[in-house]
Image (cartoon, helix red, strand yellow):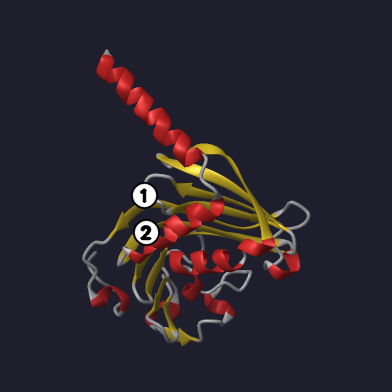
Amino acid sequence: MYKIILCVLGYIVLTQFSFGQSYEESLRQIQAKFHTIDNVSCTFVSFARLDDRSEEIIYKYYFRKPASVRMEIQNGKYEGTILLYTGGDVRLKLGHGILSWFSFSFDRSNKIVCDLRGNGIHQSDWGWFIEQHLQMISLTVSSLKGMDIINGRQTLHYELLSEHPEQTKSISKEDIWIDNREYILIQYKQYDQNGIMIQSGVYKDIILNTNMSDTLFSEFFIKH
């Protein structure tokens, strides 16, 4: 019984310590964690809205430093499509149809290989997200809303309110969930001035620092 009490008290102390942590402290923590990561694989659920159009795309996502990305679309009319990026153009191969016999290359800012809001594959990794949010700290007011369980992970939930939406990519409010044990990004939701969600991302089945071959980012058809 004594050991159980000590364990419970220890958990409470650790939880309260994390719960009192500021958004900037947590952001610095995930930045420090990112420095230790060489590669990431996960399922990435991306949502984007522009005017009356919206799309949700589920990717099998692979990233390796410094800038290699592989994204395999898992749903919708483009299911099976693969995008490869290693720092130059984005290479694309459609999942089905006559055009799937060929591969194509596009500038990374081409709308064909960007989401509805113009975010490209080179802006998909945690490092880019962290840098963008560090730059916007002075433009937002943050608060810790609580602790939530997201996809089986205990997270710190922060709310950011922009004082200058015109300088924060039209984002007026953002909710961010950070794993408070591993300090990795788990989920984010971004809203415009009307309270409409315009962008979100969810990371599931996260695996860090495994062996990733060069062919993962250079060949469309490989054995995982």
Tell me the amino acid under the disc marked 1: Glu
Q: Is residue 96 left or right of residue 159?
A: left
Foreground residue among 16 and 193: 16
Q: Count how many numbered circles sit on residues in the image.
A: 2
Residue in the picture at 55% in, 65% down: 134
In the displayed image of the protein, which residue is found farthest to the right?
Answer: 194
Q: Are marks 1 and 2 in contact (CB under 8 Å)?
A: yes
Q: What x and y, as percent, mark residue 108?
A: 50, 82
Q: What x and y, as percent, mark residue 126?
A: 45, 64
Tell me the amino acid under the disc marked 2: Lys
Q: Which mark is residue 33?
A: 2
In the displayed image of the protein, which residue is found farthest to the top?
Answer: 1
Q: Is residue 48 left or right of residue 187?
A: right
Residue in the picture at 56% in, 82% down: 110
Q: CA distance from mark 1 to mark 2?
A: 8 Å
Q: What residue did someone put label 1 on?
A: 182
Res 197 seen here: yes
Foreground residue among 36 and 16: 16
Q: What x and y, as percent, mark residue 60?
A: 38, 61
Q: Which mark is residue 195?
A: none
Foreground residue among 96 and 26: 26
Residue in the picture at 44% in, 74% down: 97
Q: Earlier in the sequence, mark 1 or mark 2?
A: 2
Q: What x and y, as percent, mark residue 120?
A: 53, 74
- Circle 1 — which element? loop
